[in-house]
Image: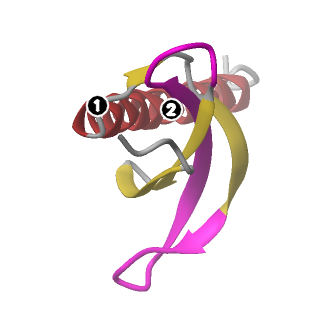
Amino acid sequence: MLELAPWLIGLALVALVWWSAMGAKARARAAARAACEDAEMLFIDELALKRLHLARDAHGKRRLARRYGFEFYQRGDRRYTGTIEMHGQRVARVHMGPRPVD
């Protein structure tokens, strides 16, 4: 039974990391949708993880930082890109690329 303990601990750690990643992605998706609604744009694509690294948050603590990319449009078939920066489970920054101004 003791031979299984390291495997079970490893499996539990993998599950914890996966659960944390899914929570961060859900928060990033909600932030992207909200930013698109505020700008009167339509969120059209799911998020894509662009970068995963360690970074300091606003309080100077090291956090796992994630950068997600997404696409949106206003009308027609021209797509625009945006990014979401996450520090841990917190949305650090939402950036929507250049788009037409009416």
Residue type (three-letter) at the residue carrying disc 1: Glu
On whether residue 92 falls in the magenta region, the answer is no
Q: Residue at x 30, y 39 (%)?
A: 39
Q: Which residue is mark 2?
A: 16
Q: Which stretch did the figure color magenta? A: 54-78
Mark 2 to mark 1: distance in Å? 36 Å
Is disc 1 placed on a helix, strand or loop? loop
- Image: 1 above or below 69: above
Of badges 2 and 1, the one in the foreground is: 1
Q: Which residue is mark 1?
A: 40
Is disc 2 placed on a helix, strand or loop? helix
User: In the displayed structure, does residue 91 sit left or right of residue 48?
Assistant: left
The numbered disc on residue 67 is none
Point out residue 63 in the picture as x, y percentages from the top left corner.
51, 65
Residue 3, quarter of picture: top right
**Foreground: 26 or 95?**
95
Q: Residue at x 51, y 27 (%)?
A: 72
